Image (cartoon, rainbow, N blue to C red):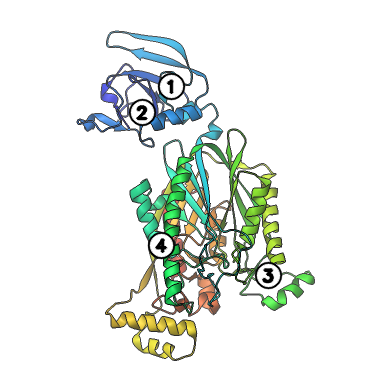
């Protein structure tokens, strides 16, 4: 909406060019409220000639944009949410006189809208909205992961996609999406981001699309396109399901925004210890090592970051939590969310009406061990839910209502782009996945395609109050979480599996060691190379620190 700016304000309190700057609040149609830029709660009102309009006036250089609200109706809604009966000192001015009086303002009176400085309780200065939707396929889309044909054989429990929208008093918004997908490919997320920009005016830096990497979830688009021995019917079903999920994701985000209402945010941190570094411990040996009470080898991140969203009424509407571990407890062909699914169900049962939302932090080289039974899977979910509940039972750290966001792509170089001769060799070596990949790459070369020497890697940095939340694409190994928490602060959330299921993202240590996560296995993800360059950790770190500086590190 538009209002006349300080050129039309008379009296002793100048506008943006002087001591005071306009706040979000407007009184009636002839009054403008000012606050000190230092952020104290003194309110000054000056006479304002002109009217409030929902349209841009012809002489728009005489007007200021009231960011964060699109219409008078939006502002009235904001007022009804935040304004209790209150009194403020009003200074009404004319060209010939200045007088001061007191008035009591209440809901439905001459106020059109109110900003956060007038809130009776600043701890509810956030606005939050939550939405959720079932994403369990109703067709025979195969389950994702494990490189084999996996038609569904039933449902253990439903799969979910959930969205948390947040807005600060200045109108800055972010939306975090969590899901029980194995992976969201760039071909899908790019279309979602484009629609969010055109339909909801959300820019890329405002939205993170995360996926748990659940291996009992459905295939999407061209994610791991060479991984499966698919046929034309399966391709058609996956394409149809993927399009439906794009539509549903955009709708879900819009619904979360529609639910924005005053809320408080608070964070804490718990511990769960079932994740095992799979690079340093043979799976068959883990039960014996645990039974003997010995320590397992290798770096892990057993922290459980927790964020609680609560309404003024006391109702908890969202509980966001994370853990660094593959959701690969189960390998059967039934739909379920693996251990994160069990954890979310248990948390939601204890908090009726709340959405429990899981993010996989940096679990690329971490497994739940031992595994392969529903009983173990439910137990790991229970352990994670208990960690969340114990954290919520302790005093949490309130988050000031402020959002800052930054995003960029960083080009991650391949060690060597694949060539035709190597592809012909791969075509004949008897490995099904490698053979399908080689055939597809050769077809692209025959069509004249030139393979890129790097891949655009998405990096997000959000500042939510006094914590930093990072969003990193694909399967980051645990070293990234440990490093960035050490460098940016232990309260930093380091979320992997964001925006794009690219491949494993090894640290320099893992790259030098080689093996599954650090070696020559990029073909499984359809990349035109076998291995990353050894410098990718340095490039990601430089990007993270650049963005952290932009949003304001601790």
Q: Which residue is mark 2?
A: 21
Of tags 2 and 3, the one toward the viewer is: 3
| 200 over 222 or under it: above or below | above
Which quarter of the figure is the N terminus placed in?
top left
- Residue 188's disc is 4
Q: CA distance from mark 1 to mark 4?
A: 48 Å
Ranked by sequence position, the earlier of labels 4 and 2 is 2
Query: In the visual, does 401 lie left or right of 385?
Result: left
Q: Which residue is mark 1?
A: 43
Q: Are marks 1 and 2 in contact (CB under 8 Å)?
A: no
Q: Nearer the viewer, residue 59 or 196?
A: 196
| 219 over 199 or under it: above or below | below
SS at mark 2? strand
Of tags 3 and 4, the one toward the viewer is: 4
Q: Residues within 10 Å of mark 2 (few under 14, many from 20)?
A: some
Image point (31%, 25%), residue name:
52
- Residue 369's disc is 3
């Amino acid at each position: 909406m538009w209002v006349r700016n300080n050129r039309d304000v008379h009296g002793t309190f100048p506008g943006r060019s002087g001591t005071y700057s306009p706040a979000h609040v407007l009184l009636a149609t002839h009054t403008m409220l000012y606050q000190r830029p230092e952020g104290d709660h003194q309110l000054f009102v000056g006479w304002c000639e002109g009217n409030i309009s929902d349209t841009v006036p012809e002489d728009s250089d005489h007007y200021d944009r009231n960011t964060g609200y699109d219409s008078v109706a939006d502002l009235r809604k904001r007022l009804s949410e935040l304004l209790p009966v209150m009194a403020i000192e009003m200074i009404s001015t004319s060209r010939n006189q200045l007088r001061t009086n007191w008035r009591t303002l209440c809901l439905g009176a001459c106020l059109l809208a109110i900003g956060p400085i007038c809130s009776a309780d600043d701890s509810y200065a956030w606005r939050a909205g939550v939405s959720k939707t079932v994403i369990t396929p109703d067709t025979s889309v195969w389950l994702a992961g494990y490189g084999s044909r996996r038609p569904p054989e039933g449902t253990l429990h439903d799969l979910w996609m959930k969205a948390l929208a947040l807005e600060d008093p200045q109108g800055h918004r972010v939306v975090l999406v969590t899901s029980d997908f194995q992976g969201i490919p760039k071909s899908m997320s790019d279309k979602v981001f484009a629609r969010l920009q055109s339909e909801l005016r959300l820019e890329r830096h405002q939205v993170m699309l995360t996926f748990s990497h659940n291996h009992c979830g459905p295939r999407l688009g061209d994610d791991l396109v060479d991984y499966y021995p698919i046929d034309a019917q399966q391709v058609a079903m996956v394409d149809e399901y993927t399009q439906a999920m794009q539509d549903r994701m955009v709708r879900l985000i819009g619904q979360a925004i529609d639910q924005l209402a005053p809320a408080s945010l608070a964070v804490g941190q718990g511990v769960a210890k079932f994740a095992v570094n799979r690079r340093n411990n043979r799976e068959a040996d883990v039960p014996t090592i645990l039974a003997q009470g010995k320590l397992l080898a290798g770096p892990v991140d057993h922290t459980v970051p927790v964020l609680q969203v609560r309404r003024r009424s006391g109702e908890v509407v969202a509980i966001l939590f994370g853990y660094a571990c593959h959701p690969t407890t189960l390998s059967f062909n039934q739909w379920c969310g693996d251990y994160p699914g069990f954890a979310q169900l248990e948390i939601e049962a204890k908090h009726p009406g709340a959405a429990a939302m899981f993010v996989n932090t940096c679990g690329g080289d971490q497994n739940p061990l031992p595994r392969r039974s529903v009983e173990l899977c439910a137990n790991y979910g229970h352990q994670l839910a208990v960690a969340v509940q114990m954290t919520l039972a302790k005093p949490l750290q309130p988050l000031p209502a402020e959002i800052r966001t930054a995003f960029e792509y960083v080009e991650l170089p391949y060690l060597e782009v694949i060539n035709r001769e190597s592809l012909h060799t791969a075509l004949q070596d008897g490995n099904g996945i490698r053979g399908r990949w080689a055939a597809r790459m050769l077809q692209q070369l025959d069509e004249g395609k030139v393979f890129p020497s790097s891949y655009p890697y998405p990096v997000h940095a959000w500042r939510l109050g006094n914590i930093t939340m990072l969003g990193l694409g694909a399967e980051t190994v645990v070293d990234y979480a440990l490093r960035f928490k050490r460098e940016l602060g232990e309260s930093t959330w380091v979320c992997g599996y964001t925006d794009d299921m690219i491949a494993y993202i090894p640290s320099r240590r893992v790259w030098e060691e080689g093996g599954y996560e650090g070696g020559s296995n990029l073909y499984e993800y359809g990349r035109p190379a076998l291995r990353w360059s050894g410098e990718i950790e340095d490039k990601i770190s430089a990007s993270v620190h650049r963005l952290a500086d932009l949003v304001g590190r601790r």
